[in-house]
Amino acid sequence: MRILTCDEVRQAEQEATARPKISTLVLMQRAGHAVAQFCMSRFKFKSVCVVCGRGNIGGDGLAAAASLRNFGVEVSVVILAEGVGALSPDAGDLCSRLALQPMWIANDADFESEALREALGADLIIDAIVGTGFKPPLEGLARKAVEAINDAFGTIVSVDMPSGVDADSRVPAHESGDDAVFAHGIITFIAPKPTHVFGELTSGPIAVSEIGVQPALVPNTTGLGVITGQEVGITFPPRLQDAHKGQFGHVLVIAGSWGKAGAAALAGMAALRTGAGLVTIACPKSIQSTVAGFAPELMTEGLKETREGTISMEASDQLESLLTGKDAIVLGPGLSRNPGTTKFVRRLVARSPLPMVLDADGLNAFDGHYADLKARGDGAPFRVLTPHPGEAARLIGVSTNDIQADRLEVA
């Protein structure tokens, strides 16, 4: 799923509402229903307090309140305005249809009311104060409302994003110093924005509902995307009842050295856990029995080794038989930086025609040989590199501080 900026999301929404029979009010109702579904499917509660701002995000909150009430939930609504006339047109329309009396918060003194304290004692609080397009800092009633929400004891779900957060920011929210809602879950619309991916906004779920808009039709200036659970589910559908292990791929893990058998075993067990039907671990012969003892499902292959107990360059003679019948390779965990082992790694990478995950010492083998990672001839058609900051620094020839200063740009 592509990550879109605020402007791109607005463009997608404008193009959707330019078509006949799709109004901004309809999109708001769809968003509210999506919020209600998200809350019902993810959290347990009997009572809800929806805190709404004056804009369209507040309208989404009102639509969510109406949907939740239809589900039989006890709902109260707090609106940060003097009356209906202060709301956006669509939000005002929804408010006039609401089958309950909202609580209006027009000034700071209203936050001291017993009725508001009782409302904020709900099991679930929906934060619908401000959303896409907001730029910090929070001011006035919005800031007071965020403080009140954060002081409450209920589960907090934010609509679009936690109020107080800049949607286009790539800085973790806790580093910005701005006031913001501490959400237990977030549901956004049309597409994820940069802060949903880089902002570390919540430890809970983040959901995206396209609400009938087609975000694929607008430009993606960031060039960034994020893999969602839904996309993973499409890639790995439920297995047939008569399926067998031979139908789900054979992963070859080349890893380990004397004293680092666990690295090889953990990589192999991870391959099994993610769904590979067959896993073979190729490791130095001296640790083969140790690796095999971690899990009976793992197959092992002992390779020629150096005097230090690492894979030897002579093991290259075993490559052809090793690669036969395999679908993908994991190369690197615990291999060590022995000169002979690094030569073996570079030779394998240059020759392997299989998709490959290159990790840890598999990457360190290319310290000073970064250009050799480029695929040549029948080289691997697809490679996943998983460097930590130190490994990335060695690969590129910069300091770890340079990496940490802008990890996204370096990537």
Image (spheres, rainbow, N blue to C red):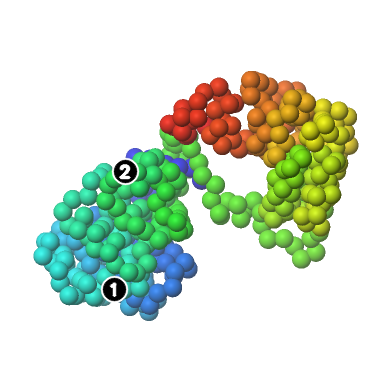
Q: In this figure, which residue is indicated by the disc labeled 2?
A: 176
Q: Nearer the viewer, residue 76 or 84?
A: 76
Q: Is residue 306 visible?
A: yes
Q: In this image, 118 relative to 353: left or right?
A: left
Report the amino acid beneath label 2: Ser
Report the amino acid beneath label 1: Gly
Q: Nearer the viewer, residue 309 or 90?
A: 309
> Looking at the image, which residue is at 63% across and 20% down?
368
State how far apart marks 1 and 2 are (Cα).
Answer: 29 Å
Q: Quadrant of residue 296?
A: bottom right
> Looking at the image, which residue is at 71% across and 34% down?
336
Q: Position of residue 58 (x, y in %)?
A: 27, 59
> Looking at the image, which residue is at 35% across and 73% down?
123
Q: Position of residue 126 (x, y in %)?
A: 33, 64
Q: CB of mark 1 within 8 Å of CB of mark 2?
A: no
Q: Is residue 92 visible?
A: no
Q: In this figure, which residue is indicated by the disc labeled 1?
A: 121
Dot 1, crowdedness within 10 Å: few (<14), some or many (≥20)? some
Q: Dot 1 lies on which element? A: loop
Q: Position of residue 381 (x, y in %)?
A: 70, 32
Q: Which mark is residue 290?
A: none
Dot 2, crowdedness within 10 Å: few (<14), some or many (≥20)? some
Q: Quadrant of residue 220?
A: top left
Of the image marks 1 and 2, the number of the one nearer the N terminus? 1
Q: In this image, 161 relative to 226: left or right?
A: left
Q: Quadrant of residue 370?
A: top right
Q: Position of residue 349 (x, y in %)?
A: 74, 29
> Looking at the image, which residue is at 61% across and 55% down?
233
Q: Nearer the viewer, residue 33 or 107?
A: 107
Q: Nearer the viewer, residue 363 or 120?
A: 363
